[in-house]
Every structure is written in C-alpha cells, then in structure tokens.
C-alpha cells in the first residue's frame, strides 16, 4: 500500500476543500434535498471519517483495480476493488480507509434523516440501519450515479427534479438491498386522478422552473418517495421524464408558431444551456430544433 496522506471527513461540504489540500482534484460538487454528489480525481491515499450523519457511497468509475483497506467498528476489511464497484460507508462509525491507486471516483452522500424517513414510510424499520460492504457490484447504483455525473459534465448542472428523484431511488434501493431489516418494501399503487391532475398542473405551470421532487410532491400532499413511485406507476414514466417530455412538446409548439430564437426557447423552458436543449430535443424528436422549425414551417 502506498504511503497514505490522511484527511478527516466531517460534512459533505467539507470534503472538496480538505481533499484538494492533500493533492486530490475536485471536479464538481452539487447538492439538493439531502443528497450530495461529488466527483474527483483521487490520488493514492487514505481518509479518516468521524460520525457524520450521512451515508456515503463511493463509486470508482475509472482506474486500475485497487487494493482497499478499511478499519471500521474495531475490525479491518481488506479487498480488491475493481472500477464500477461501490463502497458503502455508515454515518455513525469512526472509520479509516486507504487505497493504493489513483482513480476517477464519484461520492454520493445521503443524509441519515432522509433514509430514516424512507425506512419509516416503507415499514422497513423505525430508522435506517445499513450493511456497509467494502466492495459491491450494484448495477443500479453504478448506472444511476454515472448518469448524474454525465449530465453534470455535459450540461454543467443536474436539474433538481432529476437529481432529487434519482437520490430518492438510490436511497430506497439502499434500504431494500442493504438494510439490516429483512422485510421487503411494499408494492404501493397508482395515484388518484385528482392528485395526478394536480401534479400535471404543477408541472405545466412550472415548465421553465428548476423545481425539485420535494416541491412537486408537496403540491399533491404526498411524500417524495411515494409520489415518485405512484406517478411512475400511473403514467408509465418517472416525474423528470414526464416534465422533460412536456418541455419538448412546448418547444415544438414555440418553434412552429413563434419567431423566438432557439436560445430564447431553451432558457424559457428551463434548460441549462442551448446545447442541453438541442441535444434533448434531437434525442426526443430526431431533428435539432432549427431543422424542426424549417420542416414545420414548410408544412404550413
């Protein structure tokens, strides 16, 4: 194991400054509604984590297989961690971790209060208690975090609704698959018609806003987790995808009936940039916005 440098972790917001102080490079950090996402180029080294009140998932996205060591709850864990494997760290234990190779890594933090609430709402336990594997192959977490990172790196930000929905999904997945409580999550059901209408009305009224899952769920008097699941079961798509589809449909209308520029339409509908709008539009429609406008104009 390479000679480590040590950095103590306190809160998620403290880590970028401390990490950069010992030679790591913070690429970005973003947070919403009890979830934090950070992306790094890490050097060989070590960390010491005091009890923090947050659970942490570490995903090593790129790099060579790494020899990991972790001292936790009075015992050592050791293993080889390949790219794509995750490590789950508890929120209430002193631990020390060390690794012998650099890597591109993503850290995802979830507040204990969020997991406690989900545990109670789902009937799993009075509060969250998770197993903390040093290395686990978890495709759902790997793909979810990789998608959020790609969105941030490509577009410069992650929409709040996308981030908060993904955070709730990952947190519930942690409880179901890594909880010390063995009871499964209940299946749940669809959304009553009045609640669905209220949710759709809220989305339509805020197409240009960067709203999150908390605001949308509050508008229909549901918890974020149950709203997200019920909305998907009722409409067939998650809330972020539904809102994006409605933004695209509104964009098609504006492109074909007004002279507003593509850039004006992009920002009016809440896209982070013209490039984000153009790529989303092309993926959904099959043409970039400018070509769609010409085609729509020639059909009149």
Image: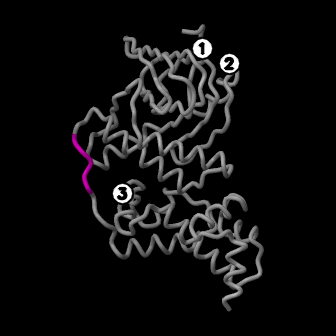
In the image, is 170 to the left or to the right of 163?
Answer: left
Query: Which residue is painted at 37% across and 76% down in the image?
Result: 194
Q: Is residue 264 above or below residue 80?
A: below
The stretch in magenta equals: 183-187
Label 3 sits on residue: 226
Give the class, few, some or many, for how many residues have Cα within 10 Å of label 1's Cα (few <14, many ≥20).
some
Q: Horizontal and vertical percent for residue 163?
A: 53, 50
Q: Is residue 189 left or right of residue 204?
A: left
Question: Which scheme is used to colour this image of the protein?
Answer: one colour
Instruction: Please tell me which of labels 1 and 3 falls first in the chain.
Output: 1
Residue 5 in the image: x percent, y percent? 62, 12
Where disc 2 sits, the SS reads loop
Residue density around tag 2, few if under 14, some if 14–19, many if 20 or more, within 10 Å: some
Confirm whether residue 151 shows in the render: yes
Which residue, given by chain and number where applicable, does mark 1 sit on? 6
Q: CA distance from mark 3 to mark 2?
A: 42 Å
Residue 22: which disc?
2
């Amino acid at each position: 194991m390479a000679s480590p440098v040590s950095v103590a972790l306190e809160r998620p917001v403290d880590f970028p400054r401390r990490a950069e102080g010992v030679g790591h490079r913070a690429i970005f950090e973003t947070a919403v509604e009890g979830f934090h996402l950070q992306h790094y180029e890490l050097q060989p080294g070590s960390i010491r984590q005091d009890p923090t009140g947050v659970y942490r998932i570490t995903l090593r996205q790129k790099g060579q297989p790494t020899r990991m060591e972790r001292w936790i709850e009075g015992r050592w864990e050791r293993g080889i961690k390949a790219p794509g494997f995750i490590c789950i760290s508890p929120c209430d234990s002193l631990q020390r971790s060390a690794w012998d190779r650099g890597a591109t890594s993503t850290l995802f933090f979830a507040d204990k209060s969020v997991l406690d609430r989900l545990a109670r709402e789902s009937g799993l336990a009075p509060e969250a208690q998770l197993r903390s594997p040093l290395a686990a192959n978890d495709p759902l977490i790997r793909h979810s975090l990789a998608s959020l990172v790609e969105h941030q790196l490509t577009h410069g930000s992650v929409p709040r609704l996308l981030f908060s929905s993904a955070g709730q999904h990952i947190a519930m997945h942690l409880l179901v698959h890594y909880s010390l409580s063995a009871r499964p999550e209940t299946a749940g059901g669809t959304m009553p018609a009045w609640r669905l209408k209220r949710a759709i009305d809220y989305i339509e009224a805020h197409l240009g806003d960067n709203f999150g899952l908390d605001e949308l769920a509050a508008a229909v008097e549901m918890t974020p987790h149950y709203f997200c699941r019920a909305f998907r079961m009722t409409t067939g798509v998650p809330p972020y995808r539904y809102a994006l589809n409605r933004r695209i449909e509104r964009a098609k209308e504006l492109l074909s009936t007004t002279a507003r520029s593509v850039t004006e339409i992009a920002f009016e509908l809440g896209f982070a940039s013209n490039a984000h709008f153009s790529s989303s539009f092309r993926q959904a429609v099959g043409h970039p916005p400018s070509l769609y406008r010409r085609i729509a104009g020639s059909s009149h």
